[in-house]
Image (tube, rainbow, N blue to C red):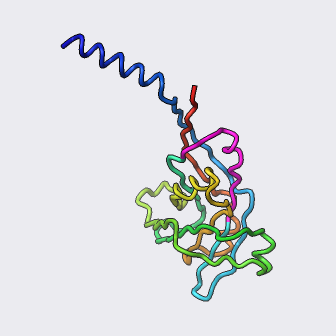
Amino acid sequence: MKQLRVWIGLLMVGLAALSPKTSADMAVLEPIQVAVCPSDSTGMNGIAALFDISALDSLGSLDVEDAVLLWEFTGLATSNLYEFTLFEAPNAWTTESIQTGQTQLVLGTPVDSWLVGPQTNEDNQGVIARLGLKRLADEWVKGTKVNNGMVITTSDVPVATLASQASAMRLQIWYSRSDHQ
């Protein structure tokens, strides 16, 4: 029995030596371009954001383990409800083309939504939106989908607040890579 355990242990060590070594890491990205989208007829406000993920391309073959957009707003009442919805930007855009109406972003199925309720911690000075986009970020990183950015919509936050606090957005991407040795 002891000899069998030794053989199994040696087999597992051998397999581990042959398998790719995996390392995990996280990238935190700031938006390189943002544009406030004109409010629609339903009163929905939106902002388009583009993040440069090209730095991840130099790391080789990656798998996105998770990806979230974190956006902290200051100055909003923490006793209110706020709903945010994240969409994939369907086409290329620039800040100017959205603001002048040259580019229309027709939104499809939401990627994620987040409802922020009244804060129970009185020390919390802000409202944080947390929107998941693992699948979309993985497609961007792998190059199976063009990175046109994203659009975040809400009817609960004024356009001026979206615009003034856009720089607080952070895209966090957790990824792993396999290095064959």
- Counting the numbered discs, the total is 0
Q: Residue furthest top?
A: 3
Please state the extent of the stretch shown in magenta in the rendering: 49-63
Instruction: Please identify the residue farthest to the bottom as the structure is shown.
Output: 41
Residue found at x 66% / y 75%:
159
Task: Specify the quadrant of the image occupied by residue 181.
Answer: top right
- Would residue 142 be counted in the magenta stretch? no
- Please give the name of the residue rendered at 47% of the width and 22% of the height, measured from the top-left corner: 17
Q: Dividing the picture into quarters, in which one does residue 149 lie?
A: bottom right
Instruction: For the N terminus, give its image quadrant.
Output: top left
User: Residue placed at 63% from the left, 78% from the top?
Assistant: 106
Does 60 lie within the magenta span? yes
Q: Nearer the viewer, residue 9 or 120?
A: 9
From the viewer's perspective, is residue 24 above or below residue 132?
A: above
Q: Is residue 11 left or right of residue 128?
A: left
Q: Is residue 100 left or right of residue 173?
A: right
Q: Is residue 47 left or right of residue 181?
A: right
In the figure, 121 relative to 113: above or below? above
Q: Measured from the top left, where is residue 172 in percent x and y?
A: 58, 49
Write the residue at 69% across / 70% down: 91
Residue 37 coordinates in the image, percent (x, y): 69, 76
> Which of these two is toward me, 119 or 17?
17
Horizontal and vertical percent position of residue 84: 53, 69
Out of 157 and 88, give the one closest to the viewer.
Answer: 88
Residue situated furthest left in the rendering: 1
Q: Position of residue 117 (x, y in %)?
A: 43, 66
